[in-house]
Amino acid sequence: MKKTKQIIGLIAILSFIILLSNTSLAAKGSFSLSKSSVTLTEGSSTTFKINVSNSEGKFTISSSDSSVVTVSNTSEWIDSNGKTITLTAKKKGKATITVTAAEVADTNENEITGSKSIAVTVNEKTAGGSNSGSSSGSSSSGSGSSGSNTTKTPTFKSTNQKVYTTGDCNLRSSWSTSSSATPISKDTELTLTGTSTETVNGYTWYRVTYQGSTKYVASSLITYNKPDNKDKNDDKDDNKNEKSSNKNLSSLEIDGIAMNPTFDKDTTQYTAHVDGDVDELKINAKAEDKKAKVAVEGNKGLKEGDNIIKVKVTAEDETTRTYFITVTKGEGTEIDTGLKLSELIIERVDFESTFKPDVYSYDLDLTSYVEKLDITATPSQADATVEISGNEDFKEGENVIIILLTSADGNETATYQIKVNVPAEVMEKAAEEENISLYILIGIAVAIVLIAIIVVVRRHRANREDDYEEEFLEDDDIKIRSDKQDGIGGRRFASYENEEQLEEEEEQEERKIRGSRNATLDEFFNAQDDEEDGPRRPRGRHSR
């Protein structure tokens, strides 16, 4: 009875250990964010919460563009209570907030890694009156507006570059010359955030950022080339013997083709469009300084799509300036040399036919659960970097994958979003499959343990019976031999007159001894069965 209880207890302990280990495996730690996307207005703020499950540790929080959105904390230790982080919108634009597990472990001391992101869009703050930079076309015809104003709204292509003013000019609060003006001086540095090829109110407008505010300026008033930091008060007589650094063009045109915008010596970026049968262009370029040299390349052997023509001006002092003309051959008039993706592949998903470089947001519905989507993103610029976040540890509902592109010089960025929807039925099916696998694993483990215990018990029982039988048989053999020598054997040597009678008496004596031995064995095993409180098994007679 005692040994049976020990065996049952051993089985229970082993089963509990297996269940505990598998339960711990199923309860692996994780973390999540309360929001996947946010839209703010300049100057406003919002919060999101970082939640952890069965884990705790250090997390880092960062903004891809702190000039657009800032975070209240860049590093936090987070436990089961979670942590709330504040986001503050600084200026119009887009940014990605990334939360990364830096030193995080779950309750089983397994390391938790990975990152999750929030896509943030900041809209320009709408000011009252006609000076609002975000006013719509329908409101531009209100009282007091001049007849020259138009309701047309230019379309801007996002960019992120440093530009400089070519002279003293005004920055406008909207794309209208009647909007409020901010005067600035020549060579003022601005951040170019949007370009347009459309003419509105007589000008081609560019969108810029100046001292944290969004402004608009005519494209002809800015240049991409950083001005020379030369002392303007230098005496001209001291420079008579110096070589000229003038590397400006006085004129630039394509024979028979219109360029956009209109040429200005300080504007270095132009666009043009030609028909599909044009293979070569004649470029007319003249330098301001007679001692400067002009070289043109890329104007021959035009291919379908975009072609870059470079007009390089080399000044007398060997300094250079390059004017760029992007010529599109064939269908379409849109010119876009900005940073983007040229290819986007998602493993096990037919996404290539859906992807278009100029489309920055996609929706993807999962029909079966996957822990991670393997994504290959190829940028249009060879030296650009690609950061992918949010493509693993999906939860039920909407999940956002962020693909952030950054140019080699860090001046240009582009962001793609893939909204991954995980239906409730997909999560339920994944949970059922996980439970089935867990139950199968537990069943196999318990079966192995039970088989091992049964084998051990049977071997132990067999060995015990063999030992007892061997012990009693040895005692019986000794007794029989002793009796033969001391009794029957003595009589045999004493008299040989009746040999048959002597042998018969000897056999009877042996049967008596063996009967006594068998009775002793039965009594012993019956006592063992009583002790184990089990049913008595019938026993046969043992014989040699």
Image (cartoon, grey):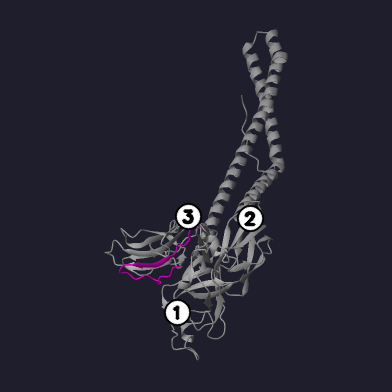
User: Looking at the figure, which quarter contains the C terminus?
Assistant: top right
Comparing labels 2 and 3, the label whose residue is closer to the camera: 3
Q: Does the magenta run of residues contain 361?
A: no
Task: Give the x, y percent position of residue 188.
Answer: 55, 69
Q: Are there few (<14), some (14-19), or many (20+) residues within 10 Å of tag 2? A: some
Question: Which residue is the extreme one toward the left?
Answer: 277
Residue 119 - label: none
Q: Earlier in the sequence, mark 1 or mark 2?
A: 2
Which residue corresponds to the image point at 56% horizontal and 53% vertical from the top-left?
A: 439
7 to 475, vertically: above or below: below
- Mark with earlier residue (1, 3): 1
Residue 90 vertical position relative to residue 77 in the rendered view, above or below? below
Measure the alpha-carbon separation of dots 1 and 2: 45 Å
Percent from the top left, x then y, of residue 376? 46, 56
Residues rendered magenta in the picture = 242-265
Mark 2 or 3, nearer chain start: 2
- Note whether 84 is above or below 461 in the view shown: below
Residue 247 part of the magenta-drawn span? yes
Query: How many numbered marks have been drawn onto this rendered protein structure?
Result: 3
Q: Amino acid at mark 3?
A: Asp
Query: Is residue 490 found left or right of 313 in the rendered image?
Result: right
- Identify which residue is drawn at 46% across, 85% down: 138
Categorize mark 1 by other alpha carbons within 10 Å: few (<14), some (14-19), many (20+). some
Residue type, label 1? Thr
Real-space Cα separation, disc 2 to disc 3, in angstroms: 28 Å
Pointer 3 residue: 383
Q: Which of these two is toward me, 25 or 358?
A: 358
Dividing the picture into quadrants, the one containing residue 78 is bottom right
Name the residue: 37% across, 64% down: 285
